Amino acid sequence: MSDVVKAAVLIEPGKIEIREYPRPKLEEGALLVRPLMSGICGTDKHGYQGDAVQYAGTPREIYGPYPAVPGHENVAVIEEVKSSRGGKAVDFYGNELNHGDRIVISPDIMCGTCYWCRHSFGYTWCDNIRSYGHLDCSVPPHLIGGWAELMYVFPGSHIFKISDDVSDQIAVLAEPMAVAYSLDIAKGFSSLPHEGFSSGDCVVVFGVGPLGLCHLLKARLLGAGTIIAVDRSEFRLNFVKSYGADVTIDVDKTSAQERRDMVLGLTAGRGADVVIECAGAAEVLPEGIELLRQGGTFIEVGHFVDVGDIQINPHRHLCAKNIRLIGQMNLAYTGIIPSIDLMMKNRDRFDFDSIVTHRYHFRDSLEGLIQSMRPNSMKVVIHP
Amino acid sequence: MSDVVKAAVLIEPGKIEIREYPRPKLEEGALLVRPLMSGICGTDKHGYQGDAVQYAGTPREIYGPYPAVPGHENVAVIEEVKSSRGGKAVDFYGNELNHGDRIVISPDIMCGTCYWCRHSFGYTWCDNIRSYGHLDCSVPPHLIGGWAELMYVFPGSHIFKISDDVSDQIAVLAEPMAVAYSLDIAKGFSSLPHEGFSSGDCVVVFGVGPLGLCHLLKARLLGAGTIIAVDRSEFRLNFVKSYGADVTIDVDKTSAQERRDMVLGLTAGRGADVVIECAGAAEVLPEGIELLRQGGTFIEVGHFVDVGDIQINPHRHLCAKNIRLIGQMNLAYTGIIPSIDLMMKNRDRFDFDSIVTHRYHFRDSLEGLIQSMRPNSMKVVIHP
Amino acid sequence: MSDVVKAAVLIEPGKIEIREYPRPKLEEGALLVRPLMSGICGTDKHGYQGDAVQYAGTPREIYGPYPAVPGHENVAVIEEVKSSRGGKAVDFYGNELNHGDRIVISPDIMCGTCYWCRHSFGYTWCDNIRSYGHLDCSVPPHLIGGWAELMYVFPGSHIFKISDDVSDQIAVLAEPMAVAYSLDIAKGFSSLPHEGFSSGDCVVVFGVGPLGLCHLLKARLLGAGTIIAVDRSEFRLNFVKSYGADVTIDVDKTSAQERRDMVLGLTAGRGADVVIECAGAAEVLPEGIELLRQGGTFIEVGHFVDVGDIQINPHRHLCAKNIRLIGQMNLAYTGIIPSIDLMMKNRDRFDFDSIVTHRYHFRDSLEGLIQSMRPNSMKVVIHP
Amino acid sequence: MSDVVKAAVLIEPGKIEIREYPRPKLEEGALLVRPLMSGICGTDKHGYQGDAVQYAGTPREIYGPYPAVPGHENVAVIEEVKSSRGGKAVDFYGNELNHGDRIVISPDIMCGTCYWCRHSFGYTWCDNIRSYGHLDCSVPPHLIGGWAELMYVFPGSHIFKISDDVSDQIAVLAEPMAVAYSLDIAKGFSSLPHEGFSSGDCVVVFGVGPLGLCHLLKARLLGAGTIIAVDRSEFRLNFVKSYGADVTIDVDKTSAQERRDMVLGLTAGRGADVVIECAGAAEVLPEGIELLRQGGTFIEVGHFVDVGDIQINPHRHLCAKNIRLIGQMNLAYTGIIPSIDLMMKNRDRFDFDSIVTHRYHFRDSLEGLIQSMRPNSMKVVIHP
């Protein structure tokens, strides 16, 4: 057992190095885990590119203060457990945790005592949120992201033990699928056809990278009607045809008016019931709303970082549209296991494992990041 | 019984005349009624000023094609009934209608067969909507608005018989109170504290003219916590103190930053639970959202007409805010009687009758319109 | 074109005859249609057996006053149209209706003006409800049920034109699938995991005849987790394995305690999230509730007719269980087309056509009825 | 500062003694508080009478194993604080706790890690629940109920600091008012008039002791229409007239048929929108359901203990009624402060302080318990 642990470290935007840290000593309630797979998320791309600094609406930088060990979508195997005095180490549901167990670690560590922790059940709206992959790794325990040989898991983390039949690929998708809980929120808005998300609804997803694909799949698995995917990557548009998309639209080959005509044509002239913005592009906001039917639901989940303002018309886009709009920033940690269960239940319908299109050792994180930004990839992961 | 009926007619923006029309003959299922009180609505002001042409998100003009007899918030007494063959004339709830009955007439006549009539229960999202006060009066039956001696009520209108103890003032407020059903929608979004509108919530109302006052009252009657009214009329801010407002803010005497500080100060630094936009001013959209707490609900009900675009930030205003935004264009005709009942039930708490601050004969419609645009009025009504 | 029309007529419990009626003349807005397929429902069995007299909670008999032409789950082709003066005949969504069009006819004709028609959107809670298959056929137009050569469709009926690619079998299942809208109600109870029906939920269905199968399918298509079917027919338990059931339990081969152990074993000791009662057996009520987890949802949809009382314990079954219970008597006519769409969308997953296991000419209605009561059938239909 | 602390102790059903215990030493995160007011709850009456043994649906006795210091509705002042190492003692919302602060202590201590703690936000559905007033006081720290000079507050308790302007009486009502969160659940069932609880609804409350009164008040404060109180105590029926009841019905002076006629008469023949069962009498279940309108909501909150079975008819009471039934066993600890806020906000409308009709020193607990069982009391409290 080596006392030195290697990790990929983002030193500053555009600069990744492999550094070595001492194997950390565990505080009570902590774990030391060996990452099996760690997804590359849009946040990581933005952080690497330095094109957006704030993290999740907070004033602080995505990777700041630098340096940080990236990696917040983590599947890992337990290397070491330090249980609290007297007690056993348990996961979120009370399952005992032992050396060798495979787990998913929710990215956010919450304080548990702020107003949001007290009121916003299941969602990570904590005032004092700390997120793996986005913490200063210059101070112990250093290894607080998944792009490393070993990762330190703080006490109070939301940990989910997974069974042997769950593949690493399905496990690593649990995090973005738990972001797609926005559809469950929408679903809860009403039991009647005209509000929120209902089975049979026509759903448009803007941006079908990994996050958009997860929303598309969730919509499909919850009984959506026609699903329309919009993107500029031919690879991704083709890809999602095997994962529930009925119609694909290439934004580079169509005008906004043509896209509107297509959606109206597919909905008897009414517009889509639900539009989900996963592209993180400001101009999707007015365009997406114009594709909505009256009383339709717009889910804004793609703008995790600030890419600028956009003009909208309060009358035409909001009031006269009788719109319902849901902003969704965070994941529902209570959705991690339900998301895995949902994928396992539908494994015969969709090849979830193949959603991971590329894998890189953490030594090759830079290459992985670059690949994840290319349009010919879906989920890119780091693994040892 | 005269064969000639006088009515106020809006000829073109800025021009009102008294004209005479023949007493109309009733088709089957129609009524002829004598208006007792007809409220002046923001729509009428916009129509008169000619500063907004489209009506309710449609391409057509507010008063177009001219000329029109204004008046869509109507309380009236039945003069003549022409029931359908064999049947009795009944109101929305099946109560028999006879000469002398006092009724409220919902402003919108719906086709009953379009997609929206089939799906959007209770709301007037009809594709073929026709609204009293906004129909061409140059063709028979001419008298299709409330600013007249007599008004023609088409078959298929939503009519509500009211009991003797309901004052005309309470009856005339039923229409804007039924617009405030947006709060019931918000309320239905979740049974848990963090979504929609719950008792105890801090509610900010921007614009406390008649529509804002109705929302403020509805919030108070449904158990709101601190209610903050924002306006630039000192008269209106003082007025709403007697109708449930706890705090009033004059926009002309405060900066946006000061308003934000006040709201944060009243909510332990979190922001308001619900912000209701009744001012119809585009800049309220970003400001109002910035006053919201994370996960708060923004109700956009004031932009019945287009007053221009505004810049917002999809990241900061929508996604990172975890916002829930409800656009509300129309009234719930199913809310007419519940709104009256709610006022009657709380008559000892609030002096609803005094919300009608000014009355004008329909001959003096112009004066009424001008008064309704002055900041020292609340509800201005036309009555014979 | 013959002037005489043959129909199966239920004269009294246990007695069916073929009778002849004059071809009816159409009133304005009515249709004359040729039934293609007419499902046999549990109501028909109860009516035939005479073991339950009241209809849908009303004091009147299921087939009363006798005689009646049975058949309320109808797919038909239009033979003759008598549109209202001036207008075209249209279906519920405004599609034009012409000779030769294939349609589904919702079983209930509602008055449109009673309190329930005004308030309970989408559901057939009408005070003055009239239902095809359950009306006195001794008076004109006589042919008001689907077990006949021709059927008379009253003005005001909810009619749904279907496209050519929809099979008669899928069309005839639209009605019971629209009863399964109870799951949409349950779904609407909350956006959070602990209330109503969510994706991933463990669902137990008691009684998997046609109605239970529709509920099971709906649960599956909306993303249910483990689905457990309980019945005493080996045929039906085997049948539903191909339609989404994960586990089947034969009530004749297990004790209540064993069933409870199985469900608890499949749910980590917690109990099912949702139990749906489609057996119409009173004893399922307490047993089903005991299979529920704390805060679980019980859907009571099987007791369309009264089969007696049952003892429950308000403390243990309701209060201490934190139960949510939904009684569901009627279908959602707004669910007819969404149900067809949902089946069409999932045609590759499930062989909906084969759910119709037996077909009989209306001359052989008696034989059909008897077959529908045998445990070795699923949907039995009458067709010419 | 005495080292000996006196407390009322329930030795066995019917037997209360004053005992002395050593002043407890605080573990980390615990508090020692001086009770100011401790409400007597129906649970205490049942425990004292020995007429119901199980506690909250669990197999264990209400006061078992004996002996116990009763008192779970507690307002107290902090005597001593032992914060966790390094940290400050804080209440549920993060407010610092110091000697002399006045607090409300939620009755239930939850494990925080079981399935229910993880999923049933805000509600005390914990598998390992421990409740003040119902714990074995023969072992240290002994003083785990409010009928004593001092009370020990375990780490992990939900504690709510209250401001000076909140009276002890309002604070002591926070607990039963937080049980009335069942109405918020009901409210969340739908945004449309026909489901759950909406403003204007006719509400019947069976049993208007303290719990029923809290539900009645909550309904009133949330905008209910006509509220009907049913009880057999003339004192209580008169009492609630000042707290929002519009109509009162004495069960001893009316037949079930007469009660039904009264409710139907007040609801245009439809039945009540919501019936709340706070009497804890099994026969209220069928009677209450029969008073409901179609699609109405029945809230079962009174059967905290088992008082026997009752016969219902699954067809007539559940299915044909299209009922929505909510069982509600526990309180929402997240409702404690909102309940206090709601009362404070409406202090000018209702004299909440006078709901506490009787006070007894803990030395006179027996007398207090007996008084609480008499029909001529509302809330009876123990205070030093």
Image: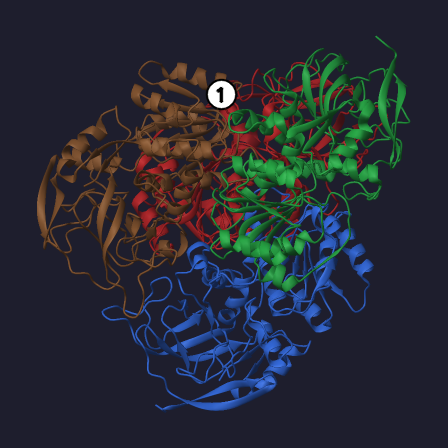
Chain colours: A green, B blue, C brown, D red
Q: Residue at the location (78% across, 59% down)?
A: B259
Near mark 1 (Cα within 10 A), the count class, few <14, some 14-19 or many ≥20, is: many
Horizontal side of D129 relative to D294 (left or right) equals: right
Residue most extreme to the top: A1
Q: Is residue C186 above or below residue A362?
A: below
Horizontal side of A275 relative to C238 (left or right) equals: right
Marked residue chain, label 1: D
Q: Is residue A77 above or below residue C171?
A: above
- Residue B244: quadrant of the picture: bottom right
Q: Quadrant of the N terminus of chain C?
A: bottom left
Q: Residue at the location (32% across, 50% down)?
A: D261
Q: Residue D99 or C247: which is nearer the viewer? A: C247
Q: Position of residue D40 (x, y in %)?
A: 58, 33
Q: Residue at the location (82% across, 63% down)?
A: B255
Q: Is residue C334 above or below residue B20?
A: above
Q: Residue at the location (32% across, 74% down)?
A: B98
Q: Amino acid at mark 1?
A: Val
Q: Position of residue A173 (x, y in %)?
A: 65, 29
Horizontal side of C107 relative to C365 (left or right) equals: right
Q: Position of residue D79 (x, y in %)?
A: 78, 30
- Badge 1 is on which residue? D53
Secondary structure under the numbered disc 1 in the rendered image: loop
Q: Is residue A349 visible?
A: yes
Q: Residue A252 or D334: which is nearer the viewer? A: A252
Q: Position of residue C164 (x, y in %)?
A: 34, 46
Q: Is residue A271 visible?
A: no
